Image: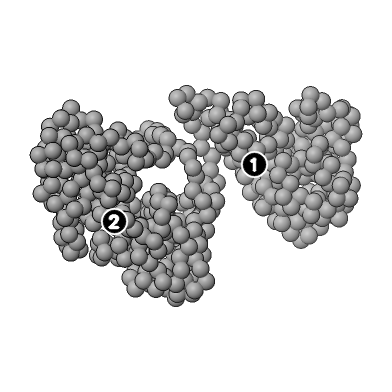
Amino acid sequence: MGRIQRALVSVSDKTGLVEFVRELAGFGVEIISTGGTARALKDAGVPVIEISEFTGFPEMMDGRVKTLHPKVHGGLLCIRGNAEHEAAAAKHGIKPIDLVVVNLYPFEKTVAKPDVKLHEAIENIDIGGPSMLRSAAKNHASVTVVVDAADYAAVLAEMRANNGDTTPELRSKLALKVFATTSRYDGAIAAFLGRTGGLPDTLTLSLPKVQALRYGENPHQKAALYGDFGKYFQQLHGKELSYNNILDLTAAAELAAEFSEPTVAILKHTNPCGVGSAPSLRQAWGLAYETDKQAPFGGIIAVNRPIDAAIAEAIAEIFSEVIVAPEFLPDALAILQKKKNLRLIRQLALPAAGLAVRSVIGGMLVQDRDTRLVSADEIKVVTKREPTQAERHALLFGWRVVKHVKSNAIVFAGADDKVCRTLGVGAGQMSRVDSSKIAVWKAKEAGLSLKGSVVASDAFFPFPDGVIAAAEACATAVIQPGGSVRDAEVIAAANEHNLAMVFTGIRHFRH
């Protein structure tokens, strides 16, 4: 195949466009372009042929019809070296197009806006773009197709090395990216237009592979990471993340993000070992770590403030797998980077909403992510005794934590005017009473008193025994969803033991 002679450029995202096309022009490539892309290139002094001039047909209908033309798709789909194709092209005045540079209208970004209107979403459905991309990708034996600005440099590098042409290997790789992109794009449109009860009638997933992982949950399982993980997390130091690291750091980041005050969360196997909130991260670390000094070995630490030297020195005293923070100050980074295997992860953002997807035999389960919490005004006191202000503070803290503990989940917590902390965590038991017993045992092992503590339960107490166990552990208040057929018996037991109890009306099962 000869060098690239003609390129069709039409992009929504113009990042790096002018520099790229200017270099193409330097190779002698004829540039055809459309609408706003053509204007941007002309303004930059890049010679451009308007699409209407190339096709002999005007753009119309607010730009909806401009590239859906035989001279465009014939130029893309013509098989070079095929006598019949080339004869038809010559007969109809169709010139070959060797390079297509197209990225699509920002449909996903548009529909992500909370107040998006249907007509706005419809107008951001790209028709000509996917059509050109698919035509070019189908004929990638002859046509180079670029859908991602990140690939501009690779195309130019190959053109420099190959007398203005690209290799079949690169064209194949770029074509694969096109089909993955258009599949995801169509899936996003179908999901938006087919919403029923907030969920799509058809779920289409098309996610790029971010990286192959050494193995999955266990060494005999193959694994890879897909999606846009890098949009939310950036690794600053340490060896490659494992499958389990990624699960754990995601859970840890979501937990730390629940709190507005400086908070430290320590997790192991996605369950909190300890959580503390205080005026400083260093204080919060002490509260979280004291909950359980054994489980954090090899655990995940997440904070919701930049890590400074004070907390970095404290964390460095134990072995951790991953630390997640919005930022690492230079002194802290210097301290923690001395541990060559410790993964340091900058949390760039977290999605405000979205879907949670889990595989099952024969399909997938899909639900909204559990972002619901309750405020102090929403909880309902159901006992004779009202919780004190300190108890309320601790109850709401415990409720935020228990949401992130595997069911059946029980959290003992304590608070005063300045700090909140976990005192004992019981997770993942078949009986809620068993989870309570484990939480009490963990507190005893840590040398922490439960006198005056509060108890948070992720789901209702089906029997009075759970509340009685809390009272026997010297807790003074309970927060739970309520909703059991035996609520009256549970409330009576709380009153009998002088417990304050509040209902949230919301359950936080975490299977």
Q: Which residue is mark 1?
A: 178
Find residue 232 and report its horizontal and vertical position in percent: 51, 52
Front one among 171 and 232: 232
Where disc 1 sits, the SS reads helix
Residue at image coords 47%, 28%: 198
Residue 345 relative to residue 252: left or right? right
Q: Earlier in the sequence, mark 2 or mark 1?
A: 1
Quadrant assignment, res 100: top right
The kind of residue on which mark 2 rests is Asp
* Vertical placement of residue 323 versus 317, above or below: above
Which of the pair 275/71 is nearer the observer?
275
Q: Is residue 7 left or right of residue 15?
A: right
Q: Which disc number belongs to residue 141? A: none
Q: Left or right of 150: which side holds 451?
A: left
Q: Is residue 172 visible in the rendered structure shown here?
A: no
107 vs 252: above or below = above
Residue 67 quadrant: top right
Residue visible at 68% across and 52% down in the picture: 151
Task: Say which amino acid is labelled 1.
Answer: Val
- Residue placed under numbered mark 2 in the picture: 416
The C terminus - image quarter = top left
Q: From this viewpoint, is residue 472 visible? A: yes
Q: Position of residue 55 (x, y in %)?
A: 86, 31
Q: Closer to the camera: disc 2 or disc 1?
A: 2
